[in-house]
Image: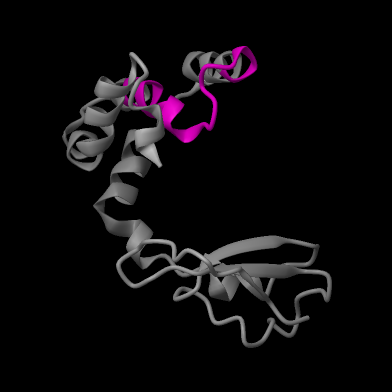
Amino acid sequence: MLARHAGASWYPSARATWDDWTERVLAATDGREVDAMMAEVLPLYTAHPEQPAVQRLIETWRRDARTNLAAIKVWENGLWQRIDVRPLLEKVRCPTLVLAAELGLNWSRRPASSPASAFGFALPVERGGGVRRKRRPVRAPR
């Protein structure tokens, strides 16, 4: 995924920041450090960072974004590994698209209180974290 941008002039520094992300976030003492890091890697999150419309959006984000350093440090310290949103799904009252790793949510039944129009897709993710190819997402039962 990232290699598709390997020929871009910004790629080497963006990739180095990407590769050292967690360590650098945890070492940061000011949210502006993380803002600068995100500004550097942001093109990696887009399909066509060279397109003028995408460049304008990236520049707007770079100008306006402000990182909450305490929050991102909690996230990078492993909150993302422990968060469980399943209890919150019972409170969904409007059509909602929920994307989840196949191993993360059990879509064998929809929460009883959620509307019939709410649905989700389980992405076919292997235990190592890679998305399996040649499988279609599974639509949650209504």
Image coordinates for residue 133, horizontal then vertical, percent: 47, 63
Q: Is residue 119 above or below residue 59?
A: below
Q: Is residue 57 left or right of residue 62?
A: right
Q: Is residue 46 above or below residue 78?
A: above
Check the image and tell me how it is coloured.
one colour
| Picture mark count | 0
Q: Is residue 47 left or right of residue 39?
A: right
| Quarter of the rendering containing residue 11 | top left
Residue 71 lies in the magenta-colored region: no
Give whichever of 61, 127 is nearer the camera: 127
Residue under the point 35% across and 67% down: 82
Query: Residue pushed farthest front?
Result: 134
Give whichever of 58, 134 is nearer the camera: 134
Image coordinates for residue 71, horizontal then vertical, percent: 37, 43
| Residue 68 appears in view | no
Give whichever of 91, 56 is nearer the camera: 56
Residue under the point 34% across and 58% down: 79
Q: Is residue 61 above or below residue 131?
A: above
Image coordinates for residue 121, horizontal then vertical, percent: 63, 68
Residue under the point 51% across and 22% down: 49
- Magenta stretch mostly in which secondary structure? helix
| Residue 109 appears in view | yes
Q: Which quadrant, please, contains the N terminus?
A: top left
| Quarter of the rendering containing residue 122 | bottom right
| Quarter of the rendering containing residue 114 | bottom right
Image coordinates for residue 32, horizontal then vertical, percent: 33, 20
Residue under the point 78% across and 81% down: 142
Residue stretch rendered in magenta on the structure? 36-54
